[in-house]
Amino acid sequence: MTPPRVALMVTCLGDLFFPEVGVSIVRLLRRLGATVEFPQGQTCCGLPLFNSGYHAEARAVAARTVALFRNADHIVVPSGSCAWMLRHEYAGLLTDGELAQDARRLAQRTYELSQFLVKVLGRREFRTTVGGRVTYHDSCHLLRGLHEAETPRDILRSLEGVEFVELPGADECCGFGGSFAVRLPEVSAQILAKKLTNVEATGATCLVACDAGCLMQMGGGLRRRRSRVRALHLAELLDGGGG
């Protein structure tokens, strides 16, 4: 059987703020037998531009991304929001000729990490050095955009040595929302406070999410609270707990 060939789209937040997540994904996929490639020259997926109404600029970013990943068998993305952008918005931005066909093909080959592990590789059972109680936050784009709630939970429920507990209000926004947190910081802070109170009420020592934006928002809030709860990307947990 030919090993799956994966192109990692690390995302701009992954590149700048969470490079360890990218490293964990590469190690994890290689352990599972995949060949992992990293197309050079990749940048943002264009979602911040798109959400802010700069569709011409987002179209240029989309065209560049499609060209970079044109020959990939599978594209794996560590953030549900960026995976949603590639899968659901590129086809509407790139409507002419060969680029339109490439955008549709790219959408069919793009997966958020947990989706790729479960739905493509058929893997649900993993080990981790992180023990104890773990809870999970649904990122908005992964849940509502990609309609995915089960693949991360399938993995966490099967994780050896871990007690998975549901988070009250798991499907509620963490308050990040890209530029929303900057434009309406007071509202964002109140949404975050409710989320973190629910997290700490679970008794978990680890909060897992599948989106870098949510991790930045919630991880920062937990550190400011001096909370004992760690915020980890699913890839870090499966790679041994991120140190």
Image (tube, helix red, strand yellow):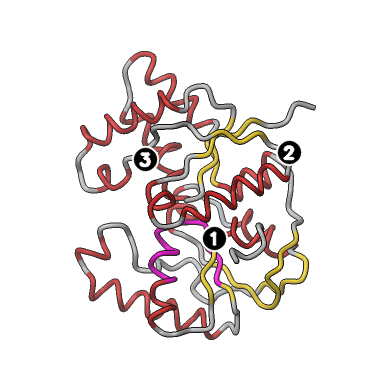
Mark in front: 2 vs 3? 2
CA–CA distance between discs 1 and 2?
21 Å
Q: Is residue 116 above or below residue 218?
A: above
Q: Is residue 234 above or below residue 67?
A: below
Image point (68%, 32%), residue name: 4
CA–CA distance between discs 2 and 3?
27 Å
Task: Name the residue beneath numbered marker 1.
Answer: 233
Residue 12 shown left or right of residue 37 in the figure: left
Where residue 178 sits in the image (x, y, percent)? 31, 57
Q: Secondary structure at mark 1?
A: strand
Q: Secondary structure at mark 3?
A: loop
Residue 30 shown left or right of residue 70 in the figure: right
Check if residue 69 falls in the magenta segment.
no
Residues tagged 1 and 2 counted as in contact (Cβ below 8 A) = no
Q: Residue furthest top?
A: 97
Circle 3: residue type: Cys
- Using the image, tell me which numbered label, if any, was put on residue 151: none
Q: Earlier in the sequence, mark 2 or mark 3?
A: 2
Task: Name the residue beneath numbered marker 2.
Answer: 33
Residue situated in front as seen by the camera: 132 or 146: 132
Prevailing secondary structure class for the magenta stretch in the rendered image: helix
Mark 1 residue crowding within 10 angstroms, few (<14) / some (14–19) / many (20+):
many
Residues tagged 1 and 3 counted as in contact (Cβ below 8 A) = no
Q: Quadrant of residue 181?
A: bottom left
Magenta segment: 207-219
Task: Name the residue beneath numbered marker 3.
Answer: 45
Circle 1: residue type: His
Residue situated in front as seen by the camera: 39 or 185: 39
Mark 2 residue crowding within 10 angstroms, few (<14) / some (14–19) / many (20+):
few
